[in-house]
Image: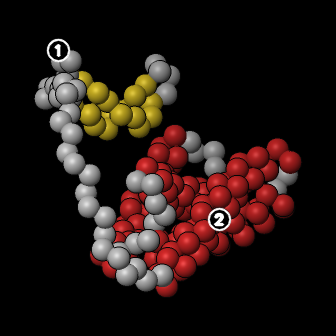
Amino acid sequence: MASDTDRDNDGLHAAGLIPTMDVSILTTHGIWATATTDVHPGVLAGSSIVVGIDVALTSGVISSLGAGRFPGRAGGVVTLLFTGPQVAATGYLAAISPASDRGGWIALSAWSGALFTYGLVSAIHDHGAARAVTTSAPPAPPPLVPDKRPPLIVPESIRLGPTVVSDGVASAVGIGVSGVLF
């Protein structure tokens, strides 16, 4: 069951998804617009929106699952609000597109549908937890056990950043890594 502080943080995390989605949408559009000119501008804009939102929401899902919990009602509702229209739009485009173009729309619809289902489960799961009331004290923290593993060493000289990569024929936006490992 989530505490009141966790619920407040869930609302902040849900609100923080909006600017993250905006950056993901713009990044997706920029990469695709740089990589190709053979796409209709409406398809480029629409699919960039769907992929950008789904990337941001998928990152949130992975983060929540890594922490072993659902994102809460606020995160579930935000996920529902943003993925519901995507499922409808991509499903419609899959239905009216020629057979050679359906695969991408079906994949986007499935991705958005999976996120929609996760958002629904998150909203319902938190709703039941919000009504439960505890009468016992929280459990005592476990005793600290000394960690005998060596510390993780990360070289300070490694740099990671955006760059332009080329195969000798075409150029595209990429990620560059440079530095000295040891």
Question: Given this view, does label 1 or label 2 mark the residue nearer the observer?
Answer: 2
In the rendering, at what x and y percent does residue 116 appear? 63, 66
In the depicted structure, whether residue 10 falls above or below residue 172:
below
Mark 2, secondary structure of its residue: helix
Examine the rendering and report whether any part of residue 31 can be seen.
Answer: yes
Q: Nearer the viewer, residue 77 or 46?
A: 77
Mark number for residue 182? 1
Tag 1: Cα neighbours inside 10 Å, few (<14), some, or many (≥20)?
Answer: few
- In the image, what residue occupies the spot 52% across and 46% down? 32
Q: Which residue is mark 2?
A: 117
Examine the rendering and report whether any part of residue 158 can be seen.
Answer: no
Mark 1, secondary structure of its residue: loop
Q: Nearer the viewer, residue 74 or 163?
A: 74
Q: Considering the image in quadrants, where does the N terminus appear?
A: bottom left
Residue type of the residue flagged with mark 1: Phe
Q: Quadrant of residue 85?
A: bottom right
Say if mark 1 contacts mark 2, CB within 8 Å: no
- In this rendering, the count of numbered labels is 2
Q: Quadrant of residue 172?
A: top left
Q: Nearer the viewer, residue 161 or 11?
A: 11
Tag 2: Cα neighbours inside 10 Å, few (<14), some, or many (≥20)?
Answer: some
The extreme left residue here reads: 156
The extreme front residue here reads: 136
In the rendering, at what x and y percent does residue 101 appear? 78, 48
Give the color scheme: rainbow, by chain, secondary structure or one colour: secondary structure
